[in-house]
Structures are given as structure tokens and as C-alpha cells.
Image (cartoon, helix red, strand yellow):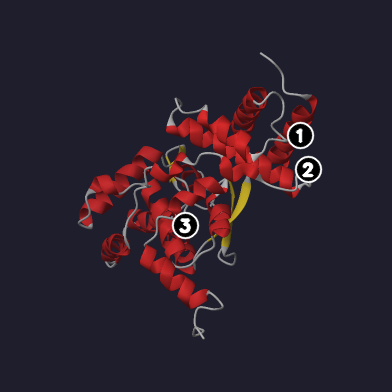
Amino acid sequence: MSQPAAGDRALIGRFLEMMAAQAGAARNTVAAYESDLRLASEALGGGLAQADAAALARLGDGWADLSRSSVARKSAALRRFFAFLAEEGFRSDDPGAALPRPGAARALPKSLDHGDVDRLFAAIAARLDRAPPDPLDLRLAALVELLYGSGLRASELMTLPFAAVAPDRPYLILKGKGGRERLVPISDRARAAVTAWRATLPPRTAWLFPSGASHLSRIRLYQLLKDLAAEAGIPPDRVSPHVLRHAFATHLLEGGADLRALQLMLGHADIATTEIYTHVDSRRLVELVNSRHPLGDRPIR
């Protein structure tokens, strides 16, 4: 196998260092980027860093026989590389727009509408109205509040330590994929739900959601949500921890949240991953522009 030219090799190396050190990309992500960039450099005769839009378009044409996911991954790697070169002054332009974008036909994530979410919380509230409330219902309330209210991954939720949620701190510090730490806002009602649940636990408990000698399992979390969905009159196959995470993201965007802020809250290394949530209602986007854009309320002269 041929090697990238010295210029490409050095710039690819600097880009990968940035991905690992500043962006906090996981080791597997860095390895995948390195492979895609080296292959692209070889295909362009060592001229990747100097490639123009026409060269990148030809490169993309050569991916015609690859799967949609492979093309999306390669395009994302190269677009991020060229953005890096432009930001660092190694290029005066960014030709990444010439690369294919197969993500247009990407399957949209399953989500829940606001009515579905209201029904889930109504079912929880009905349980908590019993006197005294069952500690397991308090646990369920805390679980769902954190899943939908903060967009946590199931694995992150299950492994929260006992003291992760502080009564006087409106955020969580999480370590997600690739060991990256991030701040995640937590609502007042989620903190109240966690406080009520934690009051039922022994003080020396290691996990916020313990089970036996360890923590609650993801399988058990799935089962709890399926049971809650059935109780709320929602088909159980429509509800899961990841669906609630998707609902968190979708509903924030519908409310006008910034995509970059959402990326940070979800812990996505690449904003291209967060962009799947931009399938919000087009009418809502028009209303957002009209209400938030500085010229939105000015008459045309």
C-alpha cells in the first residue's frame, strides 16, 4: 500500500491530534478517521490537503459502490479535516461541500410527541398519588425524569453514583463515550424526583439506582419503560430509553434550542450526528425565523 505524501501525512497527524486532545474523540473514532483520510490521500496521489472541489467530487464518485453508511462516514471525516485546515490557516477555502451527503435518506430516529410524553408522566403521577407512594414508583419517576429531562444514555443513567445529583447544583457531570466529560443540565423537577427516591435508599449505597450488588440493568430499565408505556396507553414497542433521549433532543430543537448546544448536551463528538434531530416540523422552523430573526417583524418597504 502506498503512503500519503509528506504534506498530507503531517497535516493528517495534526488533525488526529486535535480530534483526540481537543474534541475528545474516542480511540476507535480517531482510527476510523485516520484510515479514511489516508485512503483518500492515496486515491488523490498524496494531494488531499490541496484538493479542490472538483477533485473531491471525483473522489466521491468513486464511492458509488459503497454502502450509504460508509459514504457518510468518509464524507464526515473529510469534511471535518478540511474544516480543520481552514480554521488553522492551512487553506484559505473549504471544499468539503463537494463531498456527497447520503444522510438525506437516513432513517429518522424514533421519537414521541408531546402528547405521548404527557401520558407517560400522567401514568407516573397516578402511581405517586397513592399514599404512601411505593419506593419503586419513586424510582421510576426519577428514571424517566432524567431520561427525558436530560437526554441521558441508558448506560450513563444506570451507572450514576449515589451522589451524582446534588440538590443545589442544576447540572450533572457525566463521562460518556470515549471518556469525554460533559455538563448536562438537570431540571428542578428531576432533582426533586431524585431526592424523593434517594431518601428511600441506605446512606452508603454506591449507585443511585442500585440492584443487588450492582446497579439496575439496562434490560430491567427497558422492561420498566415498556410496562409504563402499556399503562399509559402507548404501544410498548414505541418506548425505550433511547426513544426518550430522542424525544428530549427533538423537543428542545422544536423549542428553538441551538444545535451546537444540543450537541454538547448529548455528548456527540461530531455535530453531523446531532443533525439527525433537525427533522422538526417545517412550520415550526418558519415561525422560529419570523419570531427570532432581527428582520422578522420589519415590514417590506
**Viewer-closest of 142 and 175:** 175
Is disc 2 surrounded by few (<14), some (14 to 19) or many (20+) residues within 10 Å? few
Q: Is residue 290 above or below residue 231?
A: below
Instruction: State the residue in front, 80 or 109.
Output: 80
Helix, strand or loop under label 2: loop
Q: Earlier in the sequence, mark 1 or mark 3?
A: 1
Q: CA distance from mark 2 to mark 3?
A: 53 Å
Residue 37: percent from the left, percent from the top?
A: 64, 30
Residue at the spot of label 1: 11
Residue 198 is labelled as 3
Residue topped by disc 2: 90
- Residue at the spot 44% in from the left edge and 53% down from the top edge: 277
The amino acid type found where label 3 is placed reads Arg
Mark 2 in CB contact with mark 1 (< 8 angstroms): yes
Amino acid found under the numbered disc labelled 2: Phe
Residue 109 left/right relative to 299: left
Numbered disc 1: secondary structure: helix
